[in-house]
């Protein structure tokens, strides 16, 4: 009995020693991509056995954190300029940058019928508060200011704008009724071909610069195979279907 128990113990220890630890990759993710990222991360873990540790926020804030040594290994930005800048500064791995999605902007209200299909509610200017993301750190916030400029409404609505730190906070202002309407990422209110609640105007792409969203492997992820594996997975057909279902184009 003792020999048999000892043999079992040896076999158990050997199994523990030889079983590889679950690989992890730390990813900084633009707030607009929260919902698709949650699905893609779960699929990635299921399909590869590697785990994604994701942080969500404004691209500009992530840039500052990366410059200050934050332990992120991959960045999924809300623009194409931040990853390019990190690459030029030696903080991202050259040759790993690519566009994983092109985003769309929407003017949204949590109230049914409040926002018309042409966005004329903006010109009527009968609302008290208009939510946008901080244009200095969030590309969707910058796109919102470009729309207002194109429509000649910047001065008229300036006193009514409430800024969120990122696009998630801007969306929350609208969802909670603290703002009657706001500019959000289409992906936040869209799933499988339709608006998921409230009313919205999908802003024509001609009213703002393209929202090309690039991903890049950061220098802290250079030697992590899970970082490279995740980036490749993001380029694959399974991730592409998820991305498109939230209103992005590829």
Image (cartoon, grey):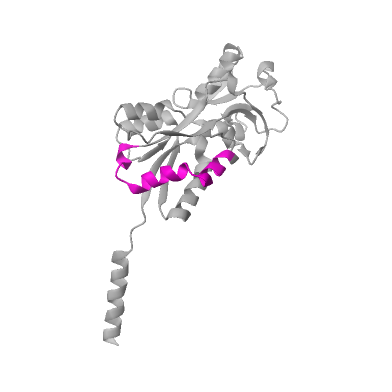
For residue 145, side relative to residue 65 (left or right): right
Query: Residue 171: where, in percent of width, then height?
Result: 57, 33
Inspect this view and state whether residue 220 appears: yes
* In the depicted structure, whether residue 8 falls above or below residue 125: below
* In the depicted structure, whether residue 239 falls above or below residue 175: below
Range of magenta residues: 218-244
What residue appears at the point 37 percent right and 44 percent down from the top-left corner? 228
Magenta-span inclusion, residue 249? no
Quarter of the rendering occupied by the N terminus = bottom left
Task: Report which quarter residue 48 is drawn in.
Answer: bottom left
Secondary structure mostly taken by the magenta-highlighted segment of the chain: helix
Task: Report which quarter residue 116 is drawn in.
Answer: top right
Query: Residue 36: where, in percent of width, then height?
Result: 53, 42
For residue 42, side relative to residue 25 (left or right): right
Of the pair 96 and 92, the residue shown nearer to us: 96
Query: Residue 143: where, in percent of width, then height?
Result: 53, 22
Query: Residue 93: where, in percent of width, then height?
Result: 32, 35
Of the pair 237 and 143, the residue shown nearer to us: 237
* In the depicted structure, whether residue 69 falls above or below residue 46: above
For residue 209, side relative to residue 114 (left or right): left
Of the pair 115 and 230, the residue shown nearer to us: 230
Inspect this view and state whether residue 176 appears: no
Task: Report which quarter residue 149 is drawn in.
Answer: top right
What residue appears at the point 52 percent right and 21 percent down from the top-left corner? 209
For residue 117, side relative to residue 224 (left or right): right
Of the pair 12 and 109, the residue shown nearer to us: 12
């Amino acid at each position: 009995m003792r020999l048999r128990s000892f043999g079992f113990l040896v076999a158990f220890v050997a199994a523990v020693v030889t079983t590889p630890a679950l690989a992890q990759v730390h990813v900084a993710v633009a707030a607009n991509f929260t919902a698709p990222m949650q699905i893609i991360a779960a699929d990635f873990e299921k399909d590869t056995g590697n785990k994604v540790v994701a942080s969500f926020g404004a691209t500009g804030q992530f840039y500052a954190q990366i410059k200050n040594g934050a332990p992120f290994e991959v960045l999924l930005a809300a623009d194409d300029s931040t990853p390019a800048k990190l690459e030029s500064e030696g903080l991202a791995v050259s040759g790993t940058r690519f566009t994983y999605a092109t985003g769309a902007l929407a003017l949204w209200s949590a109230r049914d019928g409040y926002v018309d299909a042409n966005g004329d509610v903006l010109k009527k200017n009968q609302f008290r508060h208009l939510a946008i993301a901080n244009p200095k750190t969030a590309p969707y916030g910058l796109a919102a200011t470009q729309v207002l400029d194109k429509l000649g409404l910047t001065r008229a609505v300036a006193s009514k704008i409430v800024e969120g730190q990122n696009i998630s906070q801007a969306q929350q202002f609208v969802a909670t009724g603290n703002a009657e309407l706001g500019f959000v990422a289409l992906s936040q209110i869209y799933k499988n071909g339709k608006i998921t609640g409230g009313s919205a105007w999908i802003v024509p792409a001609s009213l703002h610069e393209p929202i090309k969203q690039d991903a890049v492997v950061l220098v802290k992820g250079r030697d992590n195979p899970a970082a490279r594996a995740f980036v490749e997975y993001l380029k694959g057909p399974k991730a592409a279907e998820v991305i498109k279902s939230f209103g992005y184009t590829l």
